[in-house]
Amino acid sequence: MGLRVERIPTLGDNYTYLAICDETGAAAIIDAPEADPVVARVEATGADVRLILSTHHHFDHSAANPQLAERYGVPVYGHVSDAERLPGFTHGVDEGDEVGIGNQSARVLFIPSHTSGHVAYSFDAAGAVFTGDMLFAAGCGRLFEGTAEMMFDALCRKLAALPDETLVYCGHEYTEGNLRFALTVEPDNDAIRERYERVRKIRAHAAPDWHDATPAEMTIPTSIGEEKATNPFMRAPTAEELGRIRALKDRF
């Protein structure tokens, strides 16, 4: 018994998650821009929603917070610095804080640079981490509100320190494009090439409407170990190199 993660397609390529404690049925909604798909999944699973977790304030991860918070009568958690810009914000968290869902507990990792108030939620005992738009499968988010050094600390120190088997639940279905770029950075990396071919097959018959996506069409979750082997940003030896690669991706 542990943590069950329901992947909910939202918007055009977003992932919203319903994280459910198997033992108690208590659940958290993570990064919800739309309410209806989430409500449908909650009803289908019978989950007991207790809280809403946001990794960062961007609209495509948080727009439905107020509606869902009102529907379920639950608090909304985000980084303390986002009190004025995260929709529905009620509770601030910071590095090292813990948030409970039934018998499961998430440790907060403060990982700014995509935004200045970005956090990840690491369910250490369950081996799962929710990384929003900081760490993607084979990629990372843009440097909107931080520096390459901040991103290096987030990706190559904090997140890379998690066990290799930790499952990574990120904010978007960007994997195929990210791997296509990764091959331009490391054209001789066989692990990247093999993963790219595998992902292409998964995505080849994807539903035209992302809302209709099935689990077989999703490339998430990935793992920390797989990212260390195939993600050029996590593989960058220095902050300067990470910044250089990020600038190349911005123009890709």
Image: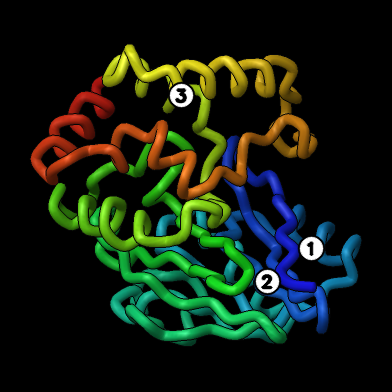
Name the amino acid type tagged 3: Ala
Q: CA distance from mark 3 to mark 1?
A: 38 Å
Compared across the picture, whether 108 is left or right of 146 comes to right
> Which disc is residue 191 wearing?
3
Tell me if residue 147 comes above or below residue 240 in the rendering: below
State whether residue 20 appears in this view. yes
Count of numbered circles on the image: 3
Quarter holding the C terminus is top left
Mark with earlier residue (2, 3):
2
Res 2 → quadrant: bottom right
What's the amino acid at mark 1? Val
Specify which label sits upstream in the sequence, 3 or 1: 1
Of tags 3 and 1, which is closer to the observer? 3
> At 67% across and 16% down in the image, what residue appears?
201
- Residue, x 48% and y 52% (percent of image)? 164
Q: Nearer the viewer, residue 54 or 182?
A: 182
Between the C-alphas of marks 1 and 2, the distance is 8 Å
The residue mark sitting in front, 2 or 3, is 3
Q: Could you say which is closer to the camera, residue 26 or residue 39?
A: 26
Element marked by disc 2 = helix
Question: Disc 1, disc 2: CB below 8 Å?
Answer: yes
Q: Position of residue 227 (x, y in %)?
A: 43, 41
- Identify residue type, mark 2: Leu
Q: Residue at x 79, y 63 (%)?
A: 39
Sort mark 1 into few (<14), some (14-19) or many (20+) by Cα contacts within 10 Å: some
Task: Kindly identify which residue carries mark 2.
Answer: 68
Which residue is denoted by mark 1 in the rendering? 39
Question: For the N terminus, which image quadrant?
Answer: bottom right
